[in-house]
Structures are given as C-alpha cells and as structure tokens.
C-alpha cells in the first residue's frame, strides 16, 4: 500500500503529478498480411492438410452465407445475419476447440457453428424457424445463440466458474460484437471472470458497425482491448481477417484457460461487408467506398495467396473447392426442404411447459378455424 501511495505523494515543490495516464497503444497481432505473406516467427505451424482444411472451412462459410441470402430473398428463409467478410473470425475462434469446450455465440455465428459440427440442414431449419434446427450436435457443448445483445456473456462466465470449481480443464468461448461492449453486463462479466480466474475467452468481433452505428460514434478509444486491460484482463488485439492470427490468438487464450491462468479478452478487428441482417439496408447509412479497404483485406483472398505461394493451391484447385462447397450446401438445402413443411397446427407448441388458459382458448379457436378451412 505504502509503495503504491508513494508514487502519488507530492514532490519537493509540493506538487502532485497529475499527468493523466496514457492508455498507450496495443499492437495488432497479425501472422498473414494482406498480400498473403506469413510472419514466420508467429506461424502456428499447421500441417499442409490443416491449412487446406482451414481454407475450405472459410469457403464453406461463404457458400452457406451466399445461399442463405438467395433463399431469404426468394422467401424460403427467415431473417438472418450474414457472415460475409468475417469468415476468418468465425472459423478461427473455434478451430482448435474440442466438443467438450463450451461455445456461446451471438446471432452472427453460423460460420463458427458449421465448424463446431452443426449440420448445415439444421442451420437452415433453425433460421427458417423450425424447432428441429435448435439442438446442438450430439455431444457438442454449444449454447443457443443470443440475439439480446450481450445477454449471454455473464452466463458464459458462470459456466466457466463452474468448470473451475469442478477442476475440469475445458475452455468457454463466448463471442459478441463491438455493440455489446456498450452493455454494462459485458463489463460485469469481464470483471467477475477476472476476479474468479474463470477459464473463459471473450471474443469481441469488432466489425465496425452496430447496425447503423459506426464505431466512432460508439466509443472514443482506439481499441476495445484496453477495456479488458482495465479489468486486469490479459487482452489480445488480433487482425480478425487473418485466419492464422486468429488461430494463434485463440490457441494462447484457450491454453491460458485450460492451464488455470484465467480469462482472456480477444478483440478481433474485422468488417461486416454485407447487411446487418436481411431486414437492413446499409446503403442508407454507409457509402460503398467505406468497404473498399476491407475488400482488399478479404480473409479468403489472403489465405489463397498464401496457399498459392506455398504451392498448396492453384487457381483451378481453389475453384474446385468453391464448387464442392457450393454442392455441399445445395445437398444440405435438399435435406432441409424435405423437413421444412409449414405446420400451422404447431404454432402454439414449444412455448410453455403447460400452456396458460388464455392461450389454450386461443389455440382451440385457431384449430377450429383451420378445420373449417380444411388446413392440415
Ligand atoms: C439488448 C438489445 N438491445 C438492442 C438490440 C437490437 N440490436 C440487434 S443487433 C444490434 C447491434 C449489435 O451490434 P454488434 O454487437 O456490433 O454486433 P454485430 O451485429 O455487428 O455482429 C442491436 C442494437 C438487441 N438485439 N438487444
Ligand atoms: Mg458490430
């Protein structure tokens, strides 16, 4: 105590040092640059087969995203939040997790969910509103995605606190957007996690926008990672469009969690190149020119340049991977179509364990109406 006080005692002239503390600069971790050059000193050392698998996972995310958009525009899919431009974040944050690790996502996470083993037909069902789409794959510790901004972050810390008490060595990964940083509960979660040394990794996908609110209208700091350090939380700022950088950051953060070194905050810098959701029109609040620098930072193009330079991928092979992924997505759509039949008689199901009397009456009336109209 005396030591820390002595730093702020007056000097000989009797004046206190009132120089404000400078937050300084937090470096951005990058392994693959925009031209696809790798920083050998930080290379996570994936095998050739793993590098190709990582690339394929990002291509699959993009193919799924693009098909979902077409289906939504044709009336076959509900509202959803596109992943375009964020493929490296999606795949990288879960790439090295085990099934027993926990993943608690926000709504813009289907790229990560595919990687966690969710069959794509199930994700189609989910976003089309069918209850069959909601259960996670067998044995995979995934939470339902959260739409209420930041609401899932404290519960994720709770899971991690439980893991620590059970002396289990699994990690919890919880992701959210830059917008969630303005929710008090997210700050509370970081604070509690640090005090408890809970094995959780907070992944903030800083994609520049919270719907129509640009970062500069939401926070005045250069970096969100500084919020983490403010809670004493080890924090990493990573280029979120660099898949190898994401893997390195997550490897360190999950290692810390597993080895009892507590939580880590990962701020992944990325950019939403598409709509906020399919109910949004970004043309009313941003210029297309805003996106140009980020198109040049495309996570997929960068990985392809790197793989080509390594002699692992040719343009023809890259085109073949895209075609394969598109075919896989179409196959999943066929499976989805076989299950996705409107079932109007079920609209009151799955709401309550025992339906309140008022809703029961509404259900009766509604079913009588369907009978009158001859609807199955
Ligand atoms: C508590 C709460 N307030 C408002 C909303 C409406 N809303 C939906 S998405 C969103 C923006 C979130 O932005 P961000 O956290 O950056 O995530 P992104 O969509 O960019 O992935 C808002 C305000 C909500 N879902 N929940
Ligand atoms: Mg955002």
Image (cartoon, grey):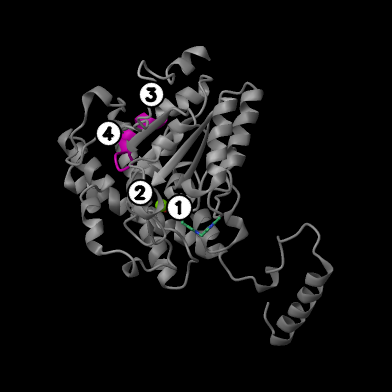
Name the residue: 65% across, 30% down.
162
Q: Which residues are magenta?
A: 239-250
- In this view, 373 is above or below 327: below
- Tell me if residue 247 is in the magenta stretch: yes
Residue bearing the label numbered 1: 108
- Quadrant that contains the C terminus: bottom right
* Of residues 85 and 74, the one drawn nearer to the viewer in this rendering: 85
| Residues marked 2 and 3 touching at CB (< 8 Å) | no
Whichever of callouts 2 and 1 sits on the residue coming sooner in the sequence is 2
Spot occupied by residue 242 in the image (x, y as percentages of width and height): 29, 39
Classed neighbour count for the residue bearing mark 2: other residues with Cα under 10 Å, few (<14), some (14–19), many (≥20): many
* Of residues 165 and 100, the one drawn nearer to the viewer in this rendering: 165
Residue closest to the far top? 3
Closer to the eye: label 4 or 3: 3
Spot occupied by residue 3 in the image (x, y as percentages of width and height): 47, 12
Spot occupied by residue 333 in the image (x, y as percentages of width and height): 45, 60
Left or right position of 347 against 93: right
Residue bearing the label numbered 4: 30
């Amino acid at each position: 105590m005396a030591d820390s006080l002595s730093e702020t005692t007056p000097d000989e002239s009797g004046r206190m040092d009132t120089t404000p503390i400078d937050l300084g600069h937090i470096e951005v971790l990058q392994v693959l640059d925009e031209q696809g050059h790798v920083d050998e000193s930080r290379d996570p050392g994936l095998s050739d087969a793993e590098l190709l698998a990582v690339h394929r996972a990002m291509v699959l995310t993009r193919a799924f995203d693009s098909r979902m958009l077409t289906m939504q525009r044709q009336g076959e899919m509900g509202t959803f939040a596109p992943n375009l431009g964020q493929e490296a974040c999606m795949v990288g944050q879960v790439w090295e997790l085990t099934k027993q690790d926990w993943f608690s996502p926000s709504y813009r996470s289907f790229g990560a969910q595919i990687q966690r083993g969710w069959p794509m037909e199930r994700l189609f069902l989910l976003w089309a509103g069918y209850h069959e789409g909601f259960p996670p794959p067998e044995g995979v510790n995934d939470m339902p995605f959260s739409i209420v901004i930041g609401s899932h972050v404290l519960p994720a810390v709770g899971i991690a606190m439980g893991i620590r008490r059970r002396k289990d060595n699994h990690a919890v990964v919880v992701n959210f957007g830059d917008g969630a940083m303005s929710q008090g509960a997210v700050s509370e979660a970081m604070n509690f996690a640090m005090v408890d040394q809970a094995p959780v990794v907070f992944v903030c996908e800083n994609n520049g926008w919270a719907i129509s609110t640009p970062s500069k209208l939401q926070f005045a700091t250069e970096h969100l990672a500084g919020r983490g350090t403010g809670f004493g939380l080890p924090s990493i700022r990573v280029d979120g469009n660099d898949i190898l950088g994401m893997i390195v950051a997550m490897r360190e953060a999950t290692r810390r969690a597993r080895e009892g070194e507590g939580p880590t905050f990962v701020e992944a810098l990325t950019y939403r190149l598409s709509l906020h959701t399919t109910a949004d029109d970004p043309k009313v609040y941003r210029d297309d020119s805003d996106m140009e620098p980020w198109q040049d930072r495309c996570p997929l193009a960068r990985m392809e340049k790197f793989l080509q330079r390594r002699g692992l991928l040719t343009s023809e092979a890259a085109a073949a991977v895209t075609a394969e992924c598109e075919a896989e997505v179409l196959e999943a759509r066929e499976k989805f179509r076989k299950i996705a039949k409107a079932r109007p008689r079920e609209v009151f199901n799955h709401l309550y364990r025992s339906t309140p009397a008022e809703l029961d009456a509404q259900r009766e009336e509604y079913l009588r109406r369907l009978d009158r109209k001859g609807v199955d």
